[in-house]
Image: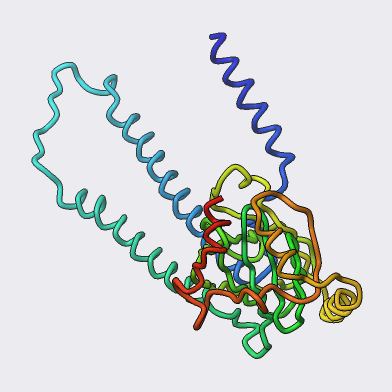
Amino acid sequence: MKKSWLRLIGLFTIVTMLTGCDPLLVLDPKGPQAQVQAKDIMLSIGIMSFIVLVVFVILAYMLMKFRASKQSPDYKPPHIKGSTMVEVICVGIPVLIVAYMSIISVQSNYKVESTPEKYKDEKPLVIYASTSNWKWHFSYPEEDIETVNYVYIPAERPIEFKLYSYGPITSFWIPQLGGQKYAMADMVNTLHLAADMPGEFMGRNANFNGKGFAENTFNVTAVTHDEFDAWVKEVKETADLLTEEKFNTLLEPGHVGQSTFNGTHLTFLPAPEGEHGGHQHGSSHIKDHASQ
């Protein structure tokens, strides 16, 4: 009896504490890609909840209808070899659910792997997001600027993140803007995102990659187009030049704060795409940092 009360108190405490938590970021989308994924998550939760509800209703019905107290002492259940109807239901319904969810998943994948439909006619902002233990480097090739551990983006404009790594595999993830995608050495993955409104968002590495994983995060700031242009102008006027020596220092394993630079490392260490893709990019310089 005492243990039962302790369990109830523990459950009440957990529920009470959870009521004060912020909403799950993946269910608080701020961009079209995240909205597609949040919708799929809620659909999955709804289907699973319905199945659980039906199972519990059937269980309660079976327990009441076939409870021992209702049967006569000499009752013997009939011998049944099988039921085609039961087998069709038990096999057919899961097959239909899986088929339906597969179709939804394929359709959603096509949507999130391309430029958001509502921004099809706008020119995307290309940002190269590279990672090293345990930091993020954001290169703006058109603006010729680079940031570390934070990224500015204009709201209501498609963004193309070009992802790659100077070390182990990491996972680029901004929960309120879209799903994660891996950043790997010797290749570039493209992630299409967009923010429907200005705001501050959390970004992080969602793939464990060593002791510094927990703090492998970055800040995302979505601003209006005019504010973005003003920020770029300010960086061009005030930020220090990113030199190869400075970038080599940033590649060393460890945590650093946020930094802003004129120029990008792409000029002296191009991304692993095109003629720089594949093993040509796996120079001893990069491998040394990756091994650390």
Give the quarter of the image for residue 58.
Answer: top left
Question: Residue pushed farthest bottom?
Answer: 121
Give the quarter of the image for residue 29.
Answer: bottom right
Q: Please tell me whether residue 220 is drawn above or below residue 122 in the rendered image.
A: above
Q: Please tell me whether residue 18 is drawn above or below residue 206 in the rendered image.
A: above
Question: Residue pushed farthest top?
Answer: 2
Q: Which residue occupies the foreground of this view, 217 or 32?
A: 217
Q: Which residue occupies the foreground of this view, 260 or 98?
A: 260
Residue that appears at 55% across and 49% down: 209
Q: Which residue occupies the foreground of this view, 59 or 113?
A: 113
Horizontally, is 66 left or right of 10 in the view? left
Give the quarter of the image for residue 174.
Answer: bottom right
Residue that appears at 61% across and 60% down: 173
Residue 291 horizontal/vertical position (percent): 52, 52
Q: Which residue occupies the foreground of this view, 196 or 241?
A: 241
Horizontally, is 182 left or right of 100 in the view? right
- The reply to whether residue 96 is visible in this rendering is yes
Horizontally, is 236 left or right of 62 in the view? right
- The reply to whether residue 39 is visible in this rendering is no
Residue 193 horizontal/vertical position (percent): 63, 72
Residue that appears at 56% across and 45% down: 210
Residue 292 horizontal/vertical position (percent): 56, 50
